[in-house]
Image (spheres, grey):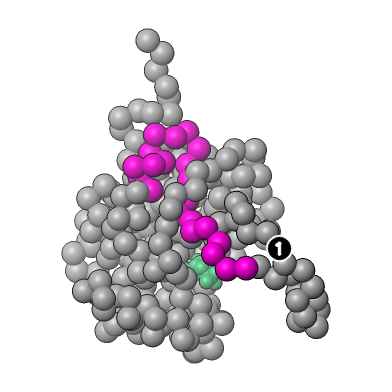
Amino acid sequence: MTVNPHQTAAARYVALIPAAGSGSRMGAAAPKQYAPLAGRPLIEHAVHRLCAHPRIDAVFVVLAPGDAQFNRCDWRGCEAKLSALYCGGETRAASVFNGLLAANDAIDANDWVLVHDAARPCLGVQEIDRLIAEVGDSEVGGLLAVPVADTLKRASAEREAVQTEGRDHLWRAQTPQMFRYRVLIEALRRADIAAVTDESSAVEQTGARPRLVQGSATNFKVTYPEDLALAELILGKAGQ
Ligand code: C5P
């Protein structure tokens, strides 16, 4: 019998949450990961959700080197899994890469890393379960995404509709994006980090084809101030 080195029973699931951005599009003085949302800082929602998931063994949060707010958050219940890494970089991809390097001793090459934006507070347990179920037996990895539903317009510099683009086979990438540690760190090492907007794009550049797993519209990224009200509605409906 041949043993597939990519499918050892020992592979664990760990989460890595880049949270070193400034959130300038929010227009607030504090970084957006600390914006108040449903009675707690935005970042607490995703971190608590991932720490509470039984399949996830460890959660690493990548913070800006001078971050003074993370330690003031309420991490009760997360102590056994949560680690803070003060090594955020200039871009999201740089923060992820630095975090992967910093967590190197705690993650095996074959372990799965679920990279999730701190700014996606409405991640559902079902989406985590689906991602693990559909990607956990692959060699490369995959990501949550939703098919594009709207009609897409190509715009001129003057913001006129120039052309209607086909939307067949187009998906909007979300997070978590889940890859083997060795696959992800090698892909990011080889990629043009300034041009990488998500982990999948770095892995795609190696010629691999990450699997697209059905996400949910509710798992959106809080980007603008009005997004906070929508996230509160969703969290309220979900009873959290
Ligand atoms: O800015 P954007 O919404 O794309 O950020 C997505 C996630 O990446 C956020 O959780 C943000 O804190 C994080 N990020 C980071 N390091 C940066 C920029 C963004 O960790 N330099």
Is 90 located above or below residue 177 in the figure? Answer: below
Horizontal side of 69 relative to 200 (left or right) equals left
Give the labeled residue for mark 1: 165
Q: Quadrant of residue 219?
A: bottom left
Is 14 located above or below residue 51 in the figure? Answer: above
Residue 61 percent across, percent down from the top left: 39, 62
Q: Quadrant of residue 190?
A: top right
Q: Quadrant of the N terminus?
A: top left
Horizontal side of 212 relative to 46 (left or right) equals right
Check the image and name the residue furthest to the top.
1
Q: Give the extent of the magenta segment.
A: 131-151
Residue 72 percent across, percent down from the top left: 30, 78
Q: Magenta span has 148?
A: yes
* Residue sitting at x 21%, y 74%: 239
| Mark 1 burial class by Cα count in 10 Å: few <14, some 14-19, many 20+ | few
* Residue sitting at x 51%, y 82%: 224
Do we see residue 222 in this rendering? yes
Check the image and name the residue furthest to the left.
77
* Residue sitting at x 59%, y 38%: 208
Residue 152 percent across, percent down from the top left: 65, 68
Do we see residue 82 in this rendering? no
Residue 35 percent across, percent down from the top left: 40, 83
Q: Quadrant of the C terminus?
A: bottom left
**Callout 1 amino acid:** Glu
Is 202 located above or below residue 20 in the figure? Answer: above
Instruction: Determine whether the residue tagged by mark 1 lies in a helix, strand or loop.
Output: strand
